[in-house]
Amino acid sequence: SEMLGLLAAVEWYLDLDHDARIAGFERTVAEWIDAFEAVPGLRASREFPNEAGQPMPRCLVEFDPALNLGATDAAARLWEGDPRVAVKTAGAYGLSITPDTLAQPTDADVVQERIIALLHVHASG
C-alpha cells in the first residue's frame, strides 16, 4: 500500500505541475495579446485548443493586410533571425505562436520583440 500511496503522490504532483504549466502559458498568451494589441497594424487573440487538439493556449497574431507583410515572409524572417523563432503561419497574414515551445520564460519577450521589430523594419524599408 506504501507503493500505491507513492504513485498517488506522483500522479498528484504531475497533475499539479501540468496545471501550473498551463497557467503559465495562459499568462504568457495574455501578455503577448496585451503587447501586440498595443501595436498599430497588429491584432492578437487567444486560440484554444491548438490544431493538434492539445489543451494548449496559443496566441494568434494578425498583420493588417495594408502592411503588405505576409505570414510566410514574416515566419521566414523570424526563423532566419538570431535567435531563431519558430512560428506557424495562419492564413495569409496570421502567425500562431505557442508558449509551450519556449525554452525559457524570457524567450516570450524575445518572440514578442522580434515580431514587433519585424513591423518596424518592414515599415522603414
Image (tube, helix red, strand yellow):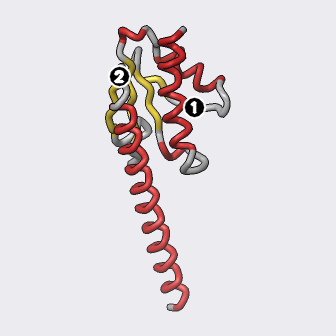
> From the viewer's perspective, is residue 21 above or below residue 94?
below
Q: Of residues 71 and 82, which is closer to you in this image?
A: 82
Neighbor class of circle 2 (other Cα within 10 Å; few <14, some 14-19, many 20+) is: few
Residue at numbered disc 2? 40
Tag 1 and tag 2, C-beta contact below 8 Å: no
Q: Earlier in the sequence, mark 1 or mark 2?
A: 2
Q: How many marks?
A: 2
Residue with the mark numbered 1: 86
Kindly identify the residue that appears in the image at 52 percent across and 33 percent down: 113
Check the picture and name the quadrant holding the C terminus.
top right
Q: Does the image show residue 54?
A: no
Tell me the SS state at disc 2.
Answer: loop
Where residue 80 sits: x, y (%)? 65, 23
Residue 53 is labelled as none
Q: Residue drawn at (61%, 47%), measured in percent from left and top? A: 103
Residue displayed at 34% across by 41% down: 48
Q: In the rendered image of this protein, does residue 18 appear above or below residue 108?
A: below
Q: Which amino acid, mark 1?
A: Ala
* Left or right, residue 20 beside residue 118: left
Q: Residue drawn at (56%, 38%), measured in percent from left and top?
A: 110
Front of the two marks 1 and 2: 2
Give residue 114's position: percent from left, percent from top: 54, 29
Q: Amino acid at mark 2?
A: Pro
Q: Residue furthest front?
A: 124
